[in-house]
Image (cartoon, rainbow, N blue to C red):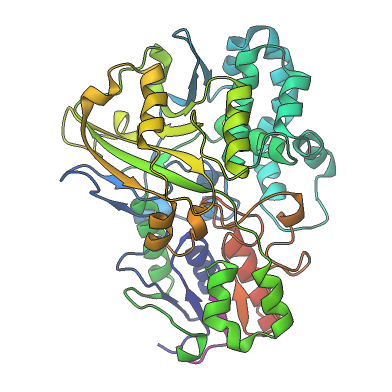
């Protein structure tokens, strides 16, 4: 097949870009270095036979919220979402836990004296969630709904610690918001860390925090199947070394970070642009553990047994200390841990009666440190006896994550720092973030707006820019 457009990298953004181009009748070919498509959307038996683990992303609230992905007929291509009874539980010392529920009203009621503040803060965002996600998951633009965006953006521009302490009175409610904000990996004293907390909570109380049945790979396979149904071609096991080695095409889109783009297409880019790409900043890495378990995790707080995701970090102050240490290049002795237990609600993940779990914490960029003992101490803190249920473990430190997926530079799973300076100007141009000085070379990865997460919108927006350049309506 002669291609109009070639996409390098079959991660969610590369697949989304290819689908968007194929929908307009372009002949599209995708090249993927690995044997399986998906990038961060891959699953494997990492521990023992019959235990399915997600290699990177596992919980996907941004996928059903995505203005593009939610329009695709992915259910016809085998995708089934699994919603846990509770999106999130945040255990506290003393045996209790706060929960983030699908219902805004139920969450607010459980927060007691902070309930009314929670309703006022999140009510407008949840009621108009589709419109909100269209505004937020986009590059710099003139907002269509400025009032709604202001309801999100004004508090979101605050540091999460300032937002939580200024609005919420109880330590538990503050910790609940802080744990969500910590997904942005920024120090909680730095703007716009508050925005990540607002977005994750709004997602939980609107579309939930679901996972694909059978593992994250199911989402990648559904996207790939849909692309093929549109006439697109996917070539796996085909590592691209240089853009000049690719067949002729009208446009080349790269689902890679600036570092890989320089390696793949630097000979086609002017020195000034290459220097700008070299200044692109990557954030802290992660250390990840996957577990095969003989039985469910023995959480002290009963609510934790009904949640798909758990935040293990105690108070706002402890979470903030953990992130602050990482940004100083230090290892946190009590790391903030994000844990998933999808097999409780998806019986395809493990043999009958047994379970899987995964957990990760942030570490300094590129750190090879082994965080297993520290992570397990945090789990045991809220689930005594956890270690006794472990059948097997699999760990990946930050350098190993990058070796597994070169887009995870230094173990950074977000495609680069997403602070105010590098939110819209990702990677260089704020008004043309997907373009390069080479008219036929484009970037469509999470290193472009709107940044990290499995939503495909970086790919979709890049495809729209390409279509405009090519004069395709």
Taking the spot 72% from the left edge, 58% from the top edge, the residue there is 139
Residue 84 versus residue 67 in the image, above or below: above
The total number of labels drawn is 0
Quarter assignment of residue 386: top left
Q: Foreground residue, 327 or 402?
A: 327
Q: Give the overall secondary structure of the magenta segment.
A: loop
Residue 287 versus residue 467 in the image, above or below: above
Q: Residue 7 in the image: x percent, y percent?
A: 49, 75
Taking the spot 70% from the left edge, 42% from the top edge, the residue there is 132
Residue 298 sits inside the magenta stretch: no
- Placement of the C terminus among the 4 image quadrants: bottom right
Q: Residue 108 in the image: x percent, y percent?
A: 63, 15
Task: Answer left or right for 330 relative to 55.
Answer: right
Quarter assignment of residue 42: bottom left
Q: Foreground residue, 159 or 148?
A: 159
Q: Residue 279 in the image: x percent, y percent?
A: 69, 67
Task: Answer left or right for 450 relative to 384.
Answer: right
Q: Foreground residue, 419 or 107?
A: 419
Asked if residue 303 can be seen in this view, the reply is yes
Q: Residue 186 in the image: x percent, y percent?
A: 65, 42
Q: Foreground residue, 188 or 206?
A: 188
The span shown in magenta is: 246-253
Task: Answer left or right for 170 relative to 61.
Answer: right
Taking the spot 72% from the left edge, 34% from the top edge, the residue there is 189
Asked if residue 473 can be seen in this view, the reply is no
Residue 370 versus residue 121 in the image, above or below: below
- Placement of the N terminus among the 4 image quadrants: bottom left
Quarter assignment of residue 198: top right
Taking the spot 72% from the left edge, 56% from the top edge, the residue there is 422
Residue 249 sits inside the magenta stretch: yes
Task: Answer left or right for 83 relative to 108.
Answer: left
């Amino acid at each position: 097949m002669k291609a109009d457009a070639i996409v390098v990298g079959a991660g969610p953004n590369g697949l989304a870009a290819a689908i968007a181009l194929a929908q307009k009748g372009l002949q599209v070919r995708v090249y993927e270095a690995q044997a399986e498509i998906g990038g961060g959307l891959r699953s494997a038996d990492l521990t023992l036979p019959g235990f399915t683990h997600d290699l990177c992303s596992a919980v996907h609230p941004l996928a059903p919220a995505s203005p593009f992905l939610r329009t695709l007929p992915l259910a016809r291509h085998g995708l089934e979402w699994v919603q846990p009874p509770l999106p999130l539980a945040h255990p506290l010392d003393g045996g209790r836990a706060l929960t983030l529920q699908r219902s805004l009203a139920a969450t607010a009621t459980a927060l007691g004296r902070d309930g009314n503040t929670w309703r006022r803060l999140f009510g407008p965002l949840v009621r108009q969630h589709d419109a909100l996600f269209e505004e937020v998951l986009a590059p710099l633009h003139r907002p269509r709904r400025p009032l709604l965006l202001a309801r999100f953006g004004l508090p979101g521009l605050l540091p999460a610690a300032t937002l939580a302490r200024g609005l919420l009175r109880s330590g538990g409610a503050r910790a609940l918001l802080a744990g969500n904000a910590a997904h942005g990996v920024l120090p909680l004293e730095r703007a716009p860390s508050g925005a990540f907390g607002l977005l994750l909570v709004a997602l939980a109380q609107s579309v939930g925090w679901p996972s694909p049945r059978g593992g994250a790979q199911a989402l990648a396979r559904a996207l790939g199947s849909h692309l093929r149904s549109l006439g697109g071609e996917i070539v796996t096991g085909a590592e691209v070394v240089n853009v000049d080695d690719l067949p002729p095409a009208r446009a080349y889109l790269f689902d890679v970070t600036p570092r890989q783009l320089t390696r793949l297409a630097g000979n086609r880019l002017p020195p000034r642009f290459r220097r700008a790409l070299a200044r692109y900043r990557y954030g802290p890495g992660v250390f990840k553990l996957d577990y095969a378990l003989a039985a469910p995790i023995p959480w002290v707080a009963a609510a934790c047994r009904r949640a798909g995701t758990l935040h293990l970090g105690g108070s706002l102050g402890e979470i903030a200390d953990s992130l602050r240490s990482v940004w100083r290049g230090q290892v946190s002795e009590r790391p903030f841990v994000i844990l998933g237990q999808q097999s409780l609600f998806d019986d395809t993940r493990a043999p009958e009666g047994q379970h899987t779990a995964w957990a990760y914490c942030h570490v300094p960029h590129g750190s090879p440190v082994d965080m297993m003992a520290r992570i397990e101490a945090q789990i045991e803190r809220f689930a005594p006896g956890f270690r006794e249920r472990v059948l097997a473990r699999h760990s990946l430190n930050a350098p190993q994550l990058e070796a597994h997926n070169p887009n995870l530079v230094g173990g950074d799973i977000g495609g680069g720092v997403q602070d105010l300076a590098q939110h819209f100007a990702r990677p260089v141009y704020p008004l043309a973030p997907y373009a390069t000085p080479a008219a036929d070379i484009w970037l469509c990865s999470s290193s472009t707006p709107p940044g990290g997460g499995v939503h495909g919108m970086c790919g979709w927006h890049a495809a729209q820019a390409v279509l405009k350049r090519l004069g395709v309506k």
